[in-house]
Image: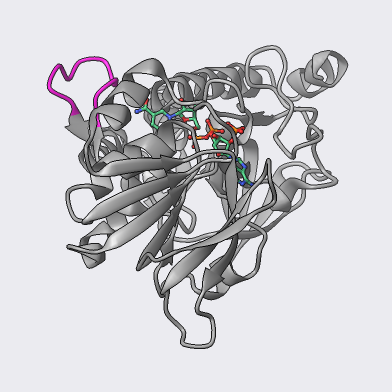
Amino acid sequence: MSERNVVIIGSGPAGLTAALYAARANLKPLLIEGLEAGGQLMLTTMVENWPGFREGIMGPDLMAEIRAQAERFGAEILQSTVSRVDLSVRPFPLELSDGARITADALIIATGASARWLDIGSDRRLSGHGVSTCATCDGYFFRGRPIAVVGGGDSAMEEAIYLTRFASKVTVIHRRESLRASKIMQDKAFANPKIEFVWDSEIAEVKDVQRGEVTGVVVRNLKTGALHDLAVDGVFIAIGHTPNTTLFRGQLDLDETGYIVTGQGTRTSVPGVFAAGDVQDHVYRQAITAAGSGCMAAIDAERYLEHLPAAADTQAATAG
Ligand code: NAP
């Protein structure tokens, strides 16, 4: 059993920034990386809005830098996942996927959010056989071929624009007649001659599950109900994310969509447990805001630890 001051779960911008700050506060944090090491920025291309890089920086490069910076100050990073945690006992016991056990005086949850799927069955069944939620990972396979992108947000526009590097044509299928994406992303997408839009529509089916590969989609017009076939070799789904909070269900206050409820900075409903990044933020959801809240969580944890055990009672009275 390893006993730690601060354990951080998750290795996106929130988790790694928390690790950096906690390490510099001499708390010797342990960060457990999780399945999607580096978080969502590992699946993106150029990040143009991270302050300090006027020409932009590639998402994976940015994460590698923050990780190295955290390690430089003594953060320990473990390639593992947490399979169980008990927030009713102090220090908090955690069990890792390899069976290892750890306790934490303070816990920072930065488990982020994962890409959503369509709920039509055929998309999941053809995952990895032409259906993807990551253009950066899979775009290369569609050189010279037509593809569809689902969604109307910044992610969908970013993916559609990126995919025009490879695809012969990109058809964006969106359920409304206007985009949710920011103006600058909309302008870029509308100006791209390889991108076409199908409005007020959804994918009713991805074909062909029998053949085990994508040969096209059946598109349903949501206003008229009419169906039509669109021949594509790939489908990229970019319809938002679901917070990764399964581990904490029933142990922490979550909102109706599953995000961790925080109050007074990054405090959760359990004293000594803090949450940062997309796992508790469905409003801003930017890498920079995730990193900012990771910094806040480390400072909140540091203050909590300074006043243990009195802090537990205070937080219980103020959280939520
Ligand atoms: P988002 O903004 O929530 O957009 C999700 C899109 O998917 C919406 O257009 C939504 O339609 C559609 N959608 C949701 N569920 C659907 C379903 N079941 N079937 C079909 N369509 C569905 O998510 P996001 O694009 O991933 O962006 C998340 C956050 O990250 C945002 O704050 C965004 O600004 C940020 N982001 C920024 C950048 C950048 O600055 N370069 C890049 C990527 C993401 P409706 O519009 O009808 O709701």
Q: Nearer the viewer, residue 163 or 173?
A: 173
At horizontal 59% and vertical 39% (from top left) the residue drawn is 200
At horizontal 79% and vertical 47% (from top left) the residue drawn is 249
Span highlighted in magenta in the image? 47-56
Residue 286 horizontal/vertical position (percent): 44, 25
Is any part of residue 229 visible from this angle?
A: yes
Residue 160 horizontal/vertical position (percent): 33, 43
| 68 lies above or below 147 | above
From the viewer's perspective, is 280 left or right of 268? left
Residue 138 horizontal/vertical position (percent): 30, 61
From the viewer's perspective, is 4 left or right of 75? right
The furthest residue to the left = 55
At horizontal 39% and vertical 70% (from top left) the residue drawn is 130
| 113 lies above or below 25 | below
Tell whether position 250 is magenta: no
Q: Nearer the viewer, residue 86 or 4?
A: 86
Quadrant containing the N terminus in the rendered view: bottom right
Q: Which quadrant of the structure image shows residue 118?
A: bottom right
At horizontal 56% and vertical 29% (from top left) the residue drawn is 276
Scheme of colours in the image: one colour
Q: Which quadrant of the structure image shows residue 235?
A: bottom left
Is any part of residue 12 visible from this angle?
A: no
Quadrant containing the C terminus in the rendered view: top right
| 175 lies above or below 54 | below
Magenta stretch mostly in which secondary structure? Answer: loop
Q: Nearer the viewer, residue 185 or 193?
A: 193
From the viewer's perspective, is 209 left or right of 52? right
| 67 lies above or below 77 | above
Q: Nearer the viewer, residue 195 or 34?
A: 195
The furthest residue to the bottom = 210
